[in-house]
Amino acid sequence: MTASQYHPTNEELTAFGLGKLDDSAAEPISRHLQACDPCLATLAGLEGDTFIDLVERADRVELPTADPNLIPRELANHPRYLTVELIGRGGMGDVYRAEHRLMNRTVALKVVNRKLVANKVAVERFRREVRAAAMLSHPNIVTSHDAEQIGDLHFLVMEFVVGTDLAKVVQKLGALPLELACDWVSQVAHGLQHAHDCGMVHRDIKPHNLMVTPDGVVKILDFGLATIASVADKISSCELERVEGGDDLSACQITRSGMLMGTPDFVSPEQVIAPNCADARSDIYSLGCTLYYLLTGVPPFSEETTIEKLEAHK
């Protein structure tokens, strides 16, 4: 049977979607999926824990009423931060409002989904992303103040932003005036330029990750966190050994083949076709999709299923 006639089994497609295959096994499946719509549709229908699954599950999660019992024990007993309430929940983790006990400063504590830091490779990636995010200092990027690990709980201490994400603004007001939409997107572009100059790529620019304050300043959320999802606990043992050996892995090397980075409505074509090599241009594409959403009130493509949306971007 020739390569063009060969169709991966469901088990192979599942392993591919979870990022469990090494590059030599994943590459031919990736090429095959680019030319085989039935297999692409099969992949989309398989159960798994890919980034798309995380996003779709996050969209279905209802935020419970604030309850002290929802605060993790590690945070409830923290000596420096008094955790007040749960204010957000999603595939990347939970967000709490907290007060620095000594400085009386309100901060946001983002507890990273334990699945995303479930092994040594993922933890190493988390630390690298935190160090890189700490280098970013720009009025249009949410500031990262600190990071900490308590047992297997990892959390970021971030600037607490009073405001509303752009998705909620559009849901409430509908399509925005041209001047306002362009102003907000221009602010995001300036923040992205700063990050790109520092070697950082967001990989999940979307209205939900952009917060506008009461005085009209737009800030980018979750720099570095989207990339961590590409590692999760789906890393091969050979890569684990390389990290333990102290080798410096690039983002392109450690991001697993077949792990989609980005949200289907705003994802760039290269993230659909070759997610391990997405760069700053992917952020620009996603920002363009975001501008379209702000001006029209709907995403660029109206297809109903995830797989149809990905095909439309391609």
Image (cartoon, rainbow, N blue to C red):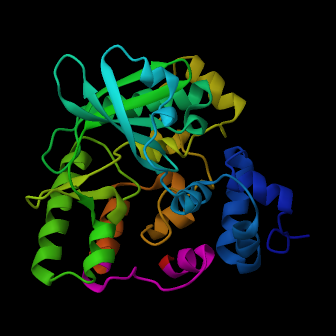
- Most foreground residue, 117 or 13: 117
For the point 47% across and 32% down, which residue is it? 71
For the point 42% across and 30% down, which residue is it? 155
Q: Is residue 282 left or right of residue 69?
A: left
Position of 296 relative to 92 (above/below) = below
Position of 301 relative to 79 (above/below) = below
Q: Is residue 239 left or right of residue 218?
A: right
Measured from the top left, where is residue 12 in percent x and y?
81, 56
The outermost residue toward the right is 1
- Most foreground residue, 6 or 243: 243
Quarter of the figure with the N terminus: bottom right
For the point 21% across and 33% down, which residue is it? 106
Measured from the top left, where is residue 34 in percent x and y?
64, 72
Residue 310 in sight from this viewpoint: yes
The outermost residue toward the top is 79
Position of 72 relative to 19 (above/below) = above
Asked whether residue 18 is drawn in magenta, I would say no
Toward which corner of the image does residue 240 lie, by quadrant?
top right
Measured from the top left, where is residue 28 in percent x and y?
72, 59
The region drawn magenta spans: 293-312
Residue 206 in sight from this viewpoint: no
Number of numbered tags placed on the structure image? 0
- Most foreground residue, 175 or 185: 175
For the point 36% across and 61% down, which residue is it? 208
Position of 160 relative to 300 (above/below) = above
Toward which corner of the image does residue 111 lie, by quadrant?
top left
Asked whether residue 295 is drawn in magenta, I would say yes
- Most foreground residue, 246 or 303: 303
Measured from the top left, where is residue 65 in percent x and y?
45, 49
